[in-house]
Image: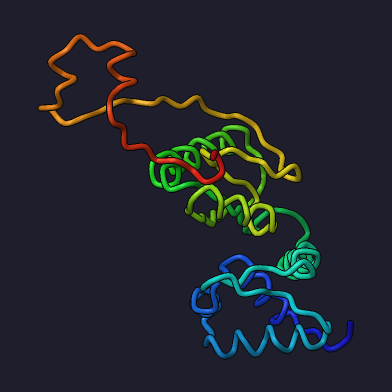
Amino acid sequence: MRGLKLRQIETFCELARQGSLALTAERLSLTESAISVSVHELEKQLGESLFNKQGRRLVLSDRGRELLPQALELIERAENFGDNGNSGRTQTLAIGATRSIGPHLLPRLIRDFEKHLDSCSIGLGKRNYELFVQNSEIVLSRLAERTLDMALVEGEVLDPSLHKQAWLSDQLIIFCRTEHPLLAKNLSLSSLNSAAWALRLSRLCR
C-alpha cells in the first residue's frame, strides 16, 4: 500500500507491545498526541481499526493481530537493511515473565544463556533483552499477540495456539507465625486440613 511510512509501522508495533500511549511515547521519544495521530492515520489508510480499548489499556483488534506479524517483519527487514551477515548486528529477544520469575530467576537464566552462546562461539552478533514482567494472564496475552518471543509463567497455559513446555519443578512451602497453635502439636495431614489458609490463586487455574 502506497503512502505508508516506516515510522507509522514502528509506532503500531510499539503500541501493540506496550498497550499504552504514555509508555509508547516514552519508548519512541514522542508525544502521546503524535503517537495517537500516527496510529489514526495508519488506521485511516487501512480503513480498519487496529486497537480496542480495554480499561486503561489498548489491545489489538482482530485485524491488528493479523497485521502485526507483517509489521514486525517489515521493521526487522528495515533494521537489517544492508547487513551482509550477523556480525555487529544487534538482536533483541523479548521475554515475558511473571512477577515471581522475572526478578528472581530470569537474570540468572539470561546469564547462563549468554555463557552458553559464548562457549559455543555462536556468531549471533550483539544481543539485547527486552523484559516484560506481569501476571501470567497478561504475559500470555502478549505472547499470543506476538509482541513477545517467549514467556516464563507459573499459570496454566490454555491457549492451543501457544507451544508450551514444562521447564522447572516448583515447591510449595508452608509457613506461619512463630506463635501459631499448630507449632505446639505434632503436625498431621488432618490438622493441616482443618487449619485456616490464606491462598494466592491465579485466574487461569480456577
> Where, quadrant-wise, is the C terminus in this rendering?
top right
Residue 152 versus residue 193: which sits nearer the camera?
193
- Whether 177 is drawn above or below 159: the answer is above
Q: Nearer the viewer, residue 173 or 14?
A: 173
Image-based side of 25 in relation to 76, left or right: left
Q: What sort of colour scheme is used for the picture?
A: rainbow
**In-image side of 48 versus 125 (left or right):** right
> Can you see residue 5?
yes
In the rendering, at what x and y percent does residue 22 appear?
49, 78
Q: In the rendered picture of this protein, how many numbered marks are placed on residues?
A: 0
Q: In which quarter of the image is residue 74?
A: bottom right
Q: Which residue lies furthest to the front in this view?
A: 194
Is 114 left, or right, of 107 in this rendering?
Answer: right
- Residue 113 in percent (x, y) is at 54, 38
Residue at point 80% right, 64% down? 66
At x 53%, y 71%, the residue is 55
Viewport quadrant of the N terminus: bottom right
Whether residue 114 can be seen here: no
Where residue 49 appears, x then y in whole percent? Answer: 75, 79
x%, y% of residue 63?
79, 70
Residue at the (44%, 46%) spot, across then down: 102
Asked whether 152 or 194 is in front, the reply is: 194
Report the residue that reaches farthest toward the left: 179
